[in-house]
Amino acid sequence: MATPTTTRSRFPRLPHAVLACAVAAGLLAGCGSGTKSTSPSSPSSAAAESASSSGDPDQAAKDDVLAAYTNMREIQIKMAEDGDLHTEDLAKYAKGDAAAELKKSVLRNRSLGIKFTGRPEMDPEVASVDTENKTATLSDCFDATNWKPVYTKSGKTVELSKQRLKYPVTSQATLEGDTWLITKITADRTKGC
């Protein structure tokens, strides 16, 4: 699968900066209503059962990668809502650029007096997994339609200029020991999904 072209820009006005904080830092979730857990969970024996019943030797790894991504997103949603970094929880599922960008987003929004309400939607899929090289790629569709930035003190909605709220996201993961960690999140804002 070809990696989408990344378009990054700096937004000079506050509404642009807020949306950029939300999407550049986590590129949040995805399309559909597939995965909506309310708290992070560890991979279960269902992953092992899924691997044996599907006949895919990489199914257990795919399930673990998907669990890491989904749990990272749940922590991201919590961080954006309460303005706290949740560093220890985040470190269980993300590292490197992915973790750094998520933290930067929280700090930026907190300094602007902004938090997020509602939640994005996600339906991520593991596009590829290479157990020999301990890497994986996920694809998702970020949909922030129902995830709104508001001013923390007043609760008023932050007015955003017209920008795409739904677009594809590609994430990278690596296996460290027996734990998959999300290491990079890249959005392609040039097209919708």
Image (cartoon, rainbow, N blue to C red):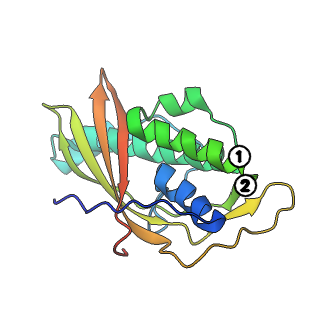
Identify the residue at image location x=55%, y=41%: 104
Instruction: Assess disc 2: are there few (<14), some (14-19) or many (≥20) residues with their C-alpha within 10 Å of its C-alpha.
Output: many
Residue 143 in percent (x, y) is at: 49, 68
- Determine whether label 1 and label 2 are within 8 Å by CB: yes
- Quarter of the image for residue 5 reads bottom left
- Quarter of the image for residue 173 reads top left
The type of residue carrying mark 2 is Ile
- Viewed as shown, does residue 136 lie left or right of 46? left
Instruction: Assess disc 1: are there few (<14), some (14-19) or many (≥20) residues with their C-alpha within 10 Å of its C-alpha.
Output: some
Question: In which quadrant will I find the C terminus?
Answer: bottom left
The type of residue carrying mark 1 is Arg
Residue 3 in percent (x, y) is at: 21, 58
Q: Helix, strand, or loop for circle 1?
A: helix
Q: Residue furthest right?
A: 154
Residue topped by disc 1:
110
Relative depth, front residue between 89 and 50? 89
Residue 183 in percent (x, y) is at: 36, 38
Q: Helix, strand, or loop for circle 2?
A: strand
Relative depth, front residue between 118 and 39? 118
Residue 167 sits above or below residue 124 on the image = below
Q: Can residue 38 be seen from the camera position used here?
A: no
Identify the residue at image location x=59%, y=60%: 17
Q: Residue furthest top?
A: 177
- Viewed as shown, does residue 86 lie left or right of 189? right
Residue topped by disc 2:
114
Q: Residue furthest left?
A: 132
- Viewed as shown, does residue 72 lie left or right of 170? right
Identify the residue at image location x=37%, y=75%: 192
Residue 136 in percent (x, y) is at: 24, 42
